[in-house]
Image (cartoon, grey):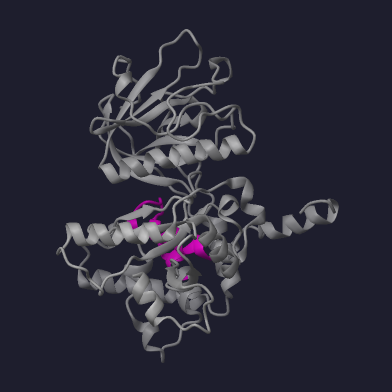
Amino acid sequence: MEVLSILLKNPYHHCLPHAIPVHMLNNTYQVISFDGSTTVEEFLSTLSTELGCRESAASGFALFSDDPIEKDLEHHIKPDKKLCDVISKWETALREKGSGKFENSRVIRLTYRNRLYFKNSIRTETDKERLLQCYQVNQQVVAGRFPVTRELAAELGALMAQLDMGDYSAANTQHNQPLAHRFYPYRYRAGLSNDELRDVEEKLRSKWVALKGRSSADCVRIYLNCTRKWPFFGATLFQARIKQPDLSMVWLAVSEDGVTVLELASMAVIGRYALSSIGLFGGLQDDLMMLIDAEDAASPVHKMLISLNKPKMAELTHLIADYKNALLRAGGPGTPQMNSLTRNGSHRSVRTKAASSLPHSSPCTLQHAPHGTHGHGTLPSHAGTLSDRNNTLTLSSHDYSHAHHGQPDILKATPDHRADKKRALAHDPGLA
């Protein structure tokens, strides 16, 4: 990869010896130069500047690589790694687990997308970040990881078509290509007949035509104002099985608020656990274990066992750790750093209560629990020494009906939050 980069690059375009494209979710890419000592953090800083985004610590955007063997699997690249080392390990894995030969037809694919989402940073996000967020949410909608009705899915799909391709034109052959596979949930089109699929396409196209004249900024504002009404906007969802206590397949939504267990079909809340209540967590044999602190020091610590594949287990563990560390840097109480199993500075007297079960309610109308004190717990490590903790967590397991999702008129969207920002700046000249 490094040799090809040097041989093929244009020296008038790049001052550093290597250059590599970084792909965005809106089907664009940015070529960034680097050298042998460039860390991922430095590479991201250059990329953010080129794109017009904030630094990764503020925006929550991160760099991901594809897997050299498994299709549709991505890996988060840690900021302290050297990019050349990452590329070298990727190529080594491709050679050792693949054909055994060097393949110059395949190179590592880097992707830039949001990983950590913080609600209090919305006011300072850039237009580029908002645009990329729309495409990321669209991916979640299409994959069934975002709760929408059929009508709302059609409205959002039409907005994405307008954002992606502009005003509809019958003379443009690209505009007459199928839209559903890009902008409409798979679960709503699976099993449909050809006539039914044609009806879906006509519905999407008619709503797209109705958006004629809407600018990209309008589409982004309307799309985000609508989708941010879901309480778990920005959370990363993992499909997993709770083994202890015994539950069926669920969604685990990981966000700055904590870990929330969602019912698989309706995405209704089953259990909610604040980050401050999650003590030790990490791999235990073939499962992920989380120890949930009780609301008082006299009560036992509860153990939660989660079954999911190893790459997702590692991703979930590091995600919880990074959210806890981010909250610590923001001013929370003492939290151990990476690869620590101690709980220095942890006092149960300030732990936030973690609800073990919550009543069934619609994910679109659920209110956020207020933030408690953050910063307890430890970051990922081996937890084999904790096998003597046999207490189990009790979750609600009664039948759930499908949640009813509201259908807001997204063309009558709420005012852009940037207007609030301008008013705040006008009253507070010291605000950055």
**Is residue 123 in the magenta section?**
no
Establish if 337 lies above or below 181: above
Which of the 4 image quarters holds residue 267?
A: top left
Establish if 345 lies above or below 200: above
Residue 402 can be seen in this image: no
Establish if 88 lies above or below 219: above
Picture coordinates of residue 131, whole percent (x, y): 54, 65
Q: Which residues are magenta?
A: 131-158
Instruction: Depth check: give the residue in front, 243 or 16.
Output: 16
Establish if 359 lies above or below 101: above
Q: Name the residue located 60 percent from the left edge and 70 percent from the top edge.
A: 217
Q: Name the residue located 49 percent from the left edge and 30 percent from the top edge.
A: 274
Q: Name the residue located 46 percent from the left edge and 17 percent from the top edge.
A: 294
Picture coordinates of residue 85, whole percent (x, y): 38, 57
Picture coordinates of residue 352, whole percent (x, y): 54, 23
Residue 119 can be seen in this image: yes
Which quadrant holds the N terminus?
A: bottom left
Q: Is residue 331 left or right of residue 263?
A: right
Q: Name the residue located 45 percent from the left edge and 20 percent from the top edge.
A: 293
Q: Farthest residue toward the top?
A: 298
